[in-house]
Amino acid sequence: MAGQRARGKSLVIAAVGWVVAIWIFFPIFWMFLTSFKGEAGAIATPPRLFFVPTLESYHEVFQRGNYWRVTFNTLGVSIGATVVALLFSIPAAYAMAFLPGKRTRGTLLWMLSTRMLPPVGVLVPIYLIARNTHLLDTVTGLALVDMFTNLPITVWMLYTFFREIPVPILEAGRMDGASRWQEITRVLLPLATPGIASTALLSMILCWNEAFWSLNLTSSNAAPLAAFIASFSSPEGLFFGKLSAASTLAVAPILVFGWISQKQLVRGLTFGAVK
Amino acid sequence: MATVELKNIRKTYTSEEIIKGVDLSIESKEFVVFVGPSGCGKSTLLRMIAGLEDISSGDLLIDGRRVNDLAPAERGLAMVFQSYALYPHMNVYQNMEFGLKLAKTPEAERREKILAVAQTLQLENYLKHKPGQLSGGQRQRVAIGRAIVRNPKVFLFDEPLSNLDASLRGQMRVELATLHRRLGATTIYVTHDQIEAMTMADKIVVLQKGIVEQVGSPLELYDHPRNLFVAKFIGSPPMNFLPGTVIAASEEQVRVRLASGQEIAVAAGSAQDLVGAGVTLGVRPEHIRLGDSVENRGSGQVELVEYLGSAAHLHVRMQDGALLVIQTEGGVGVHADDAVTFSFPAERCHLFNSEGVALHRRSSGRMAA
Ligand SMILES: Nc1ncnc2c1ncn2[C@@H]1O[C@H](COP(=O)(O)OP(=O)(O)OP(=O)(O)O)[C@@H](O)[C@H]1O
Ligand SMILES: [Mg+2]
C-alpha cells in the first residue's frame, strides 16, 4: 500500500517535471524548427509542425554575417572574463569565508546589491569610460565589463562553496607548514574544484548570453554572438527564418558545452547545498 | 625532547576573556592532559599553543624560547584533530608526505620515514587508499602518523578518540600510551574522558572558565583535590557531598555533625578556627563501607541498584533526604527498598570550607605519588 502510494507520488512528480521541462524547452525547439522552414514557412499561419526542411536560412546567415569571427569574439569574452573573475573572486571568497570580519556579511550583500540596478542605469558612464580608454568595440573592453558585472555572483558562489570546506583541514595544512599560498593552492583549491568548475561554467554562460553590453559597447570589430543575432532582426522584410538560424548557431556551442558539464552545473546551481 | 612553558597566558575574543591567565610548566617527555567542562577553554588553550589562535597576552616558551610570534610549523609541533582533518584529495601516503614535502625533505628520506611510521601504525596496506575509504580507527591512525612522521618536539591532541566507538577507543588509548612511551615526546592531550585522563596522564590540568583549578598527577587529584570543583570533576561516579557543621577540632581530627544529626570524625587537621562553621563533607562512592560500625555510621534506604558486573552502584536516600551513591563489589544481595547501614572511613573523607576549599587531609590511605 505504502509502496504504491510512494510510486504514485513519484509518478506525479515526474509528470510535473516533464511539463515544466517541455514548457521551458518549447521556444528553443520552435526556434530550431523555424530555422529550417525558410522565410515563407516561418510566418505561415497556422504554423506548421511538418514541412520540408531547407537550409536556405543558414546559407543566408553565413553569407551576410561572419559567424566564425563572432563566435571567436564570444569565446574570447567569455573565457577572458571568466578567468579574470576567478583570479579576483578566489582570494576574495577565501578571505570572506575563512577570515571573516565584522563587515563581511554586509560587504557580500552590498556586492550582490549592485546586480539589482538595471544595467541601463550606468550605460552612459560606462560607455564614456570605455570610449575614453579606447576600449569601445574591443574584446578586452566587453570582457572587462562582463567580468565586473559577474563578479558579485562568482564571489558569492565561491564563498558558499568554501564555507562547506571543514576549517580543520586547512588548519592541518598550516600545522604541516603550508604558507597561505600553499594552503590555498595545495589544500583549498583541490577540495573546491567542483565548486570552482561550476562557478566558471555559470560565468561562461552568463557572458555567452549577455546582450545588453554586447549591443551597446561593440559594433563591427568585437561583435559577439548576441550582436550577430540582433543584426538579423530588421524593421522591414521577412527575417524570422534567419533570426532563428542565427540563434540556433549561437546557442549550439554553449548548449553542447553545458550538456557535457551538466552534472557540475546542477551542483553549481544548487549553490553547493548538495553534498 | 622539549619543555613547554605558559606564563600568564590570556585570550580575549572581542570583549570576553576566555583564558584568564594560565601558568603552567610542562617537562620534557611529559604527558599532560587538559580536562574540564565543555566551554572551559581547553581547545582554545591548545590552539594557542599550536599557533592556530593568537595569544592575547602572556608568554609561550618552547625549550625556553619565546614562540608567541612563530607560525605553527616553526614551533616544532604537530596536532591531531578531533575530526582527523585528513586531506581528502590525497591518499594515505600523500597525507603523511605533505608536511615533509613542504619542509623540503629529500624524496628518499621521505619514503623511508613514511614506511617506518606506516609499519608502526599498521597502515602499510592502506598507503594508496584515500581517507574516504578508511574506517574511523584507520583514519585516526593516519592522523597520528601524519603527526609522528614530522618528528615534532611536542604532540598536541584535541579529543582524538571521541569519534570512535567504545572498544576502539580503548584499543587506541593503549596504542597511544605505548607510542608515547616509545617516542618519548612531550604531549598535550585534551579530553572529556575520565579514563583517558587518569590512565594516560603524567599530569592532569583541571580547567574551569579559563582558569587552572589544579595541576597534579592523577592520584594527587584523586586523593587531594584542592577544592570542591576538582573533587566533583575527578572520579567516576563522582564524589558524594553532604552539608554539615564543625562541632570540634583537634590536631588530628575534625568532628562534623551532618544535617541528619549523625556525627562523623574526619582525619583532617588545622580546623580549630572552623568550629561552628558550615562545611561540606566529601566521600567517594568506592570508599563508603557497607555494614554496621561504631564510628562514622550512617543509614538509609536503597532506591536503586545499578549492576555493572564487577561492581554495583547503590543509590541510597538518607533520613534527612540526602542522596548518596555507594559503590560495592559485585552484587552484595542488596535490593531496592532495603534498609542499609554503612560507614565513612575517617581517613577517606574530605572536608571543604564554605568557600569550597579543601582542608588539609592528614592521610590519604596511600603514599602520594
Ligand atoms: N572564535 C571565537 N569567538 C568567540 N568566542 C569563542 C571563539 N572560539 C571559542 N570561543 C569561546 O571560548 C570558550 C572556550 O571554548 P573552547 O572551544 O576552548 O572550549 P572547550 O573547553 O574546548 O570545550 P569543549 O569541551 O566543548 O570542546 C567557549 O565559551 C566558546 O564559546
Ligand atoms: Mg574543545
Image (cartoon, helix red, strand yellow):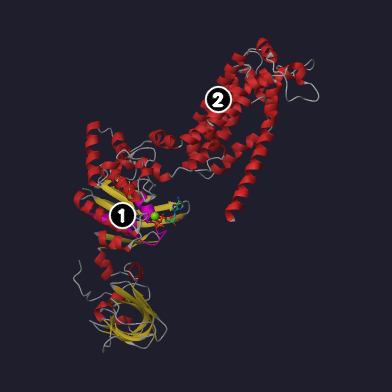
Three-letter code for the amino acid on which mark 1 is drawn: Tyr
The residue pinned by badge 1 equals B189
Instruction: Judge left or right: residue B2 versus residue B257.
Output: left
Residue B353 is one of the magenta-drawn residues: no
Instruction: Judge left or right: residue A99 versus residue A4.
Output: left
The quadrant the N terminus of chain A occupies is bottom right
Q: Nearer the viewer, residue B330 or B144?
A: B330
Q: Nearer the viewer, residue B307 or B70?
A: B307
Q: Name the spot of residue B345 as percent of width and height, x first.
A: 26, 81
Q: Name the spot of residue A205 as percent of width and height, x first.
A: 59, 28
Instruction: Judge left or right: residue A162 versus residue A38.
Output: left
Residue B29 is one of the magenta-drawn residues: yes
Q: Residue at x 78, y 21 (%)?
A: A43
Mark 1–mark 2 CB contact (< 8 Å): no
Three-letter code for the amino acid on which mark 2 is drawn: Ala
Q: Quadrant of ligand 1?
A: bottom left
SS type, badge 2: helix
Residue A81's label in the rendered image is 2
Magenta segment: B22-47
Q: Are marks 1 and 2 on the same chain?
A: no
Residue B166's label in the rendered image is none
